[in-house]
Amino acid sequence: MNISKELGKQKINQLCYIVTVNITNVMANARHNCLIVLSQNKDGNSAQSFIQSFTLLHTNFTVQISTPGGKPLEFIKQDDQSRRWLNEFRMKSLAIPISLQTIDPHRYSCLLIPHSPGAAFDLCNDKDLGQILKNFIQEKKPICAIGMGVAALFSANEDDSWLFSKYSLTSVSIFEMAKSPDFENYSIIPEDMIKDKLASYSCSEPDEVHVVIDRHLITGQNEQSTITAVQNLILLHNQKYARKEKSPH
């Protein structure tokens, strides 16, 4: 027996085993991708809702931001603190949104639409977003929409039927919208639209936290519901993919 040759084989086998274990660990620890969809309308996105959402999600996922046409981000209701945060954020490469048209929904395991008043003007009828949402519904991947961001869900239609018509949802209530100086400019009132499309709507008192979870869909009533809604998105995602990894192949 050639001892040195046998030792060489053992070392090769050990190296192969180490490489295999490392690859397995990398794959196990690979971060899932989360898609954040934002409005590019001048009425924009809530600074607070976005910052809270991004901060929570960025610690758990690889985050990609997308807008219609990949147009720049617009934020409203900024104070000094949020303005500083956003100025620093805009210096990062991930702050540059990509177009919804180029999104491959199969790459993402969850989707978030923060409180976005502008969603009632652009995302609500965006066909590219509609196709993305259709994929998420088919694969039962977690979706979270908050406040006026719920208006973006109206883009998901098939054969003149709303794909969320059999879901329970919440969104900004009429009472909350009526307090906005821009109330008369809105062509869409989510509460009315949800009811008209035969889905189930519920809400709490104005400006109170209220979150509805129905299967893989999470909706938050208003900006104040952001943290609770996003935390539930993370929990729902982790439960889904933990079960998936444990299931026999």
Image: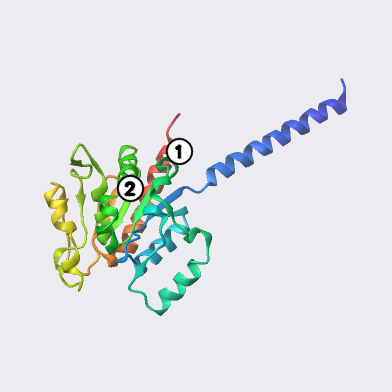
Q: In the figure, 242 relative to 83: above or below? A: above
Tell me the SS state at disc 1. Answer: helix
**Percent coordinates x, y for residue 66 in the rendering:** 41, 54
Camera-side residue: 65 or 140?
65
User: Can I make out residue 61 in this image?
Assistant: no
The relative height of residue 45 versus residue 156 in the rendered view (above or below) is: below
Tag 2 secondary structure: helix
The image position of residue 156, as x and y in percent, is 26, 45
Q: Which residue is drawn at 22% across and 70% down?
A: 207
Q: Position of residue 213 (x, y in %)?
A: 26, 51
Left or right of 103 on screen, residue 21: right
> Considering depth in this image, is 61 or 123 the residue closer to the camera?
123
Q: Report the front residue among 237 and 9.
A: 237
Q: Which residue is disc 1 drawn over?
A: 245
Closer to the eye: label 2 or 1: 2
Q: What residue type is labelled 1?
A: Glu
| Left or right for 231, reference 84 | left
Report the quarter where the C terminus lies: top left
> Which residue is label 2 attached to?
129
Q: Which of 152 and 50 is in front in this view?
A: 152
Q: In the orientation shown, which residue stands out farthest toward the bottom?
A: 80
Q: Quadrant of the N terminus?
A: top right
- Residue type indicated by callout 2: Leu
Q: Earlier in the sequence, mark 2 or mark 1?
A: 2
